[in-house]
Amino acid sequence: MGDGENTLPILVSEHIMPLLGIDAIRRQFVPSAKENEDTVGTLDPLEEASNSHEKRLIHRYHNRAAFLVTDRCFAYCRHCFRRRFTGKLIGEAGEEEIQSAAAYLREHKEIKEVLLTGGDMFTLSDSHLDRLLSILKSECPDIIFRLCTRAVATCPERFTPSLFEVIRKNQTGAPFYLMTQFNHPAELTRESIKAVEGFLDLGIPAFNQTVLLNGVNDNAETQIELANSLLRNRIKPYYLFQGDLVKGTRHLRVPIERGLEIEKEMRKELSGLGMPQYTIDLPEGGGKVILTHDYMLGKEDGTYVFSTPDGGIRHYPG
Ligand SMILES: *Cc1c(COP(=O)(O)O)cnc(C)c1O
Ligand code: SF4
């Protein structure tokens, strides 16, 4: 077996439990022995640790940052890309850590957006969340905070009226955006849709990030159904992520070549609103880059040559 360093706790939430009969769900939450056979990846392929101000604030892009509110989640995804941090008994950001993050954000006026992530911010108690949001909002009223959570999928019962009251009363200054992670249509249960509706009802727009996963959603049909269901429920498909080179996740990754085929099929069937951007977060902290089937074939005598989605050829002057 492995050396133990790439361990991630095994935890499946009550809401997910009855869904484990579905292969696509089981593969996301029930570990495989293959996790310990993976020697390809590293624990921190995005080099987040070296881009961190203190251990919780990642400032990799000049105009936006990510604050790791906690390392805890309601259920641990076997494909988690932040294995160096997630479920490591680090705990929640305390008052001092929140204050010092706020001070950093205040000093760095170029930061316009901050992702509140981890782990999952909604594992915090209502009172702790209230403290977090009220400090951040009073110190940084102009920053757009993204509320990043998988909990709407894994623990929708967490989204109680009292939690929404905490969010509502902290809706001052710049808006909140909700960022969800649904990877398969079966995750859009009635309860999960209702949890997202709680945010929408407060005027908070919802965007979804899906991870492309082997044996879970690595076909156009599943992706198209997922995107259409999300859109029907007022959640905009935002990113479709190529798997990061995280140690322990190789068996869940899909080759880029296959991903590009799926992307091409999706673009034929989905509206512009329904289509997420297929994206790779480059190793060694290179940052995110969009992947797409290339419709521009080249330039001939000053004229661009394109293939149409149906395989035709068109020209456009340069
Ligand atoms: C992905 C990411 C963001 C947000 O990037 P967008 O492309 O704006 O969604 C910000 N900070 C870090 C560290 C990230 O990994
Ligand atoms: S919810 Fe997010 S942080 Fe938690 S295990 Fe899943 S991918 Fe990792």
Image: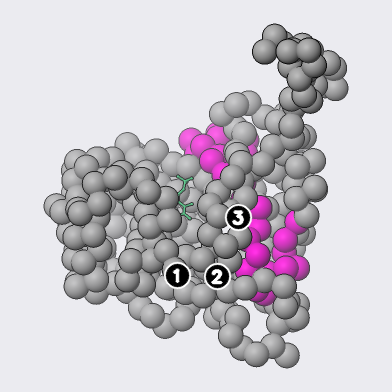
Q: What's the residue type where badge 3 is placed?
A: Leu
- Is 107 placed left or right of 28 in the picture? left
Asked if marks 1 and 3 touch (Cβ < 8 Å), the reply is no
* Residue on which disc 2 sits: 44
* Residue on which disc 3 sits: 282
Q: Which mark is residue 127?
A: none
Q: Quadrant of residue 80?
A: bottom right
**Direction left: furthest residue:** 138
- Residue 162 screen position, x and y as percent: 26, 57
Q: Nearer the viewer, residue 171 or 52?
A: 52
Q: Secondary structure at mark 3?
A: strand
Mark before the other along the chain sequence, 3 or 2:
2
Q: What's the residue type where badge 1 is placed?
A: Ala
Q: Secondary structure at mark 2?
A: loop
Mark before the other along the chain sequence, 1 or 2:
2
Q: Secondary structure at mark 1?
A: helix
Crowd rating for badge 1 (residues with CA inside 10 Å; few <14, some 14–19, many 20+)? some
The answer to whether 134 is drawn above or below residue 317 in the figure is: below
- Residue 278 screen position, x and y as percent: 64, 43
- Is 188 placed left or right of 174 in the picture? right
Q: What's the residue type where badge 2 is placed?
A: Asp
Q: Which residues are magenta?
A: 227-254
For image coordinates 35% across by 40% down, the residue present is 204
* Residue on which disc 1 sits: 49
For image coordinates 32% across by 36% down, the residue present is 203
From the image, which quarter does the N terminus lie in? Answer: bottom right
The answer to whether 18 is drawn above or below residue 61 in the figure is: below
Crowd rating for badge 3 (residues with CA inside 10 Å; few <14, some 14–19, many 20+)? some
